[in-house]
Amino acid sequence: MTEVQPPAHHQFPTPALVVAQHAARFSGTIATPRKPQSCISRYIVLLAVLASLLPIQTVGQTPTPGPSTPKPTGTLEGHWAGTLKAGDAALHLILHITKSPDGQLHAKLDSLDQAVYGIDATGVTHTESSITFEVPNAGASFEGKLTTTRQSLEGTWSQNGLAIPITFHREAPGAAGRKSDAIFTSEGTWQGALETPGLRLRLQLHITHDDKKQLVAALDSLDQGVSGMPAAKVSQKESTLNFEIPGVGGAYEGTISANKDAITGTWMQSDVPQKLNFIRQDQPLELSRPQNPVKPYPYVEDDITFPNAKANIALAGTLTTPRTAGPFPTILLLAGSGPHDRDETLAGHKPFLVLADALTRNGYAVFRYDKRGIANSNGDYASATTEDFASDAEAAIAFLKTRSDLNMKKFGIIGHSEGGIIAPMLAVRNPQQISWLVLLAAPGLKGEETLLLQSKLIAQASGLSDTQISASLAFDRQAYYLVRQEHDTAALEKKLNDLVRVSGMSTALPPPALQSQIRLISSPWFRYFLDYDPAATLKKVTCPVLALDGDKDLQVPSKENLPVIQAALEAGENKSYEVAEMPGLNHLFQRTETGAPSEYGVIQETFSPEAINKILAWIAAH
């Protein structure tokens, strides 16, 4: 597999704005599972100057077709098809204009090539023959007038200082590719998957026609988090469908079944053919997660609510206990960075569900909980720091101590990623309470070093050049300098926006993605994490420690972090610790090809059995 846009919810979200720029512009590669590629195939939505033209829809969201109520011809109301052109590139748009009972016009846009539907337009003003509106998500605006025939709407699309002429032609209701108005039998939404032992890459194919009655298509790689890769050379001759995805160097040829509900064919990429069949349906294929336990469980599962009085919030979690007689040795699971629920759900996986199941089946009581402000826990996630999450963990320990069926004299913590930072904090503060720690992919380096190294490694896996990576890291350092110098959040966000604008990245990163990155860098969590030194805390930990990391972890790389953890434990004269590198495992402890975050959702394995067995054996010995 090759690197694509990383999932938004992975551990330690990369705050590198330049890397984020490339992730947004180069939306990814579908690599045939049998022959992983070594670098990203760069896919540009339109051109670099137009890459932020329209936002990409969330993968898996069912497209919402425009209003279908017929409107009288000759008015602005109705459905309009147009093509936004820049050089040889083109973006096919459908404009839906409706009128509310108060006489006000409303507008929505569909981007056929990107499979983005129902984009809201705001600030609509109009006369009988002209209309203007804005598209906030794209930082764009449109101004147009009806032609004398009143069957075309000529105007100008403006964005990032560019003025692009565009003409919309009136279309019949539903001409955006709905089945009832399809011209070709291939039109519609199709689901398929590339499969090989251990890997399953789900794909969603959108096919429709444009204002010239020509086929257009877009492909979503659901498990890689990539949506709307435009197809080229889309054609249907009788029952044979062909298209190419230039951005990934792939091509497809398939045969449409007699009843028009299936396509049987072959995906070709890197000269490797791969069987790929599609079925006609709107809902994506189900995820394949064979390690997820199936109810009824052979243990007791209780949903729990407990308070953090210090923060004046209530948190919610799940306690699993064996069906045998207690009290049970007890384990607390602490998730990595990001808005995680109690199962640490990400990329379609539930690592903590799988881990808690294995531990409980082996005789342990296990507690896991939703982070503050997430799922069933209340509180403000956005304003919380690592220190606040540590406070929540201390509240969880206080709750566990109230349970008579738990043996808190045999109590340990398993922390993943940022959870592996929090666990040592708690062990230092409560040396008599915590018997042992297991640190999974825990950083040993300072926050800034971790972030820069992560950015570099993921960029390298994505195929960026040394020059691009150097520019990215230089930009990151400038941003981090601003974070340390400017303590007013509003002022910091303004300076970061100015820095992005001066660098020219504002033309390549969609506004919502840009603002999300800026909010992350301006957040209290980021300010705290940037200068936090895990090694200083690890030197004070006296209880037994097991530190594990996969040798293909690109987010907290083992070769740079495990030696720091070991040195810190040695410096603190910890008398019982083990530091081990797990071959072939990534940041989530999955067996992997490259370790790239884009592989997380494609891999069917949630948590390596070898890693689980290593954890179980070590805990039993301590």
Image (spheres, rainbow, N blue to C red):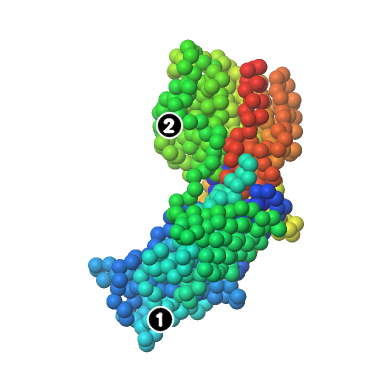
What separation in Å lies between label 1 and label 2 (alpha carbons)?
Answer: 56 Å
Secondary structure at numbered mark 1 = strand
- Position of 294 relative to 32 (above/below): above
Q: Amino acid at mark 1?
A: Ser
Residue 576: which quarter of the image?
A: top right
Q: Is residue 319 visible?
A: no
Q: Amino acid at mark 2?
A: Ala
Q: Residue at x 53, y 52 (%)?
A: 192
Q: Are marks 1 and 2 in contact (CB under 8 Å)?
A: no
- Rendering coords of residue 260 (x, y %): 46, 60
- Rendering coords of residue 190 (x, y %): 49, 56
Residue farthest left in this picture: 101
| Residue labelled with disc 1 | 152
Secondary structure at numbered mark 2 = strand
Which circle marks residue 58 in the picture?
A: none
| Residue labelled with disc 2 | 316
- Rendering coords of residue 214 (x, y %): 50, 73
Q: Residue at x 58, y 65 (%)?
A: 243
- Rendering coords of residue 309 (x, y %): 42, 28
Which quadrant would the C terminus be assigned to in this image? top right
Residue 423: which quarter of the image?
A: top right
362 vs 99, left or right, is right
Q: In the rendered structure, which disc, 1 or 2, sits on the residue that comes first in sequence? A: 1
Q: Residue at x 58, y 54 (%)?
A: 276
